[in-house]
Image (spheres, rainbow, N blue to C red):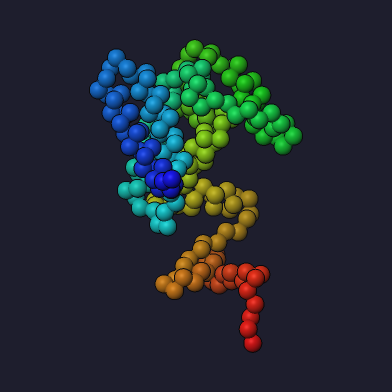
Amino acid sequence: MTNITKQNKHEIYMRAYFKSLLAVLEEENKVSEHIKKTIFYGVKAIITRPRLEYITREEVTHRFQTINIIQDCIGLLTPKEFMNIFPIAKEYDGYKWEMKDYFYTINYINTLDSNVPIGTGDKILDFLWKYYNRDILMFCVESMICASDLRKLEGYSSLLEEWATENGIKTYVMHTDSKGNQFLLDKETGTTTKVSKPRPKHLKIVK
């Protein structure tokens, strides 16, 4: 059996995404069908993205553009069409944890016209954040990570760091030297602390 890694999945979905996106432009008689495929493969490509040790402006910009295209395509669909691509997760106990669940999403969908396109801009973002589906939740998280990466490339704090600062929570930056040793940098004081990795319990020091 072939071992399909996350990198393989990402590449497979990206190829399918580009093929569907190209078909949207070339086959006018099947635009709706290809838009739906573009959304499905695009979301899958984003959420299977392998984590990189370092980010580059080229990669983040490309990722940002891809996410925007996917979101714009989603805005062309009606809620009913979107539900057929990414069904609402059948989890019903969200009230116990004050989280989204099937009922929360259904109640939200019922406030919309199921036969009218979702729309543009904030309407898309609002729809996605209120929609409960694991893939869509991961897609929203990846969108936030991408926005945060762009901020860091522009020299600003990440979204998480900004939130932490506003709430009086200290943050640290992890660095790894050429020997693989890791250090935490306190950006306020400039001091560093070496990260000590716990020794596995099954290993014992021989004297």
State which quarter of the image contains the N terminus.
top left
Report if residue 54 is visible in the image: yes
Residue 111 x, y percent position in the rendering: 60, 16
Total labels drawn: 0
Residue 103 location (% of width, % of height): 66, 24
The percent coordinates of residue 189 (x first, y second) are 55, 68
Left or right: 124 with respect to 131?
Answer: left
Q: Quadrant of residue 102?
A: top right
Seen in the image, is 162 located left or right of residue 24? right
Residue at the bottom extreme, as displayed? 207
Q: Residue furthest right?
A: 96
Q: Nearer the viewer, residue 106 or 200?
A: 200
Residue 52, above or below 77: below
Residue depicted at x 42% and y 57%: 53
Q: Closer to the camera, 5 or 93?
A: 5
Kindly identify the residue that appears in the image at 52 percent across and 35 percent down: 135
Residue nearest the viewer, comparing 204 with 88? 204
The residue lying furthest to the left in this view is 26
Give me the residue at 41% from left, 46% from top: 2
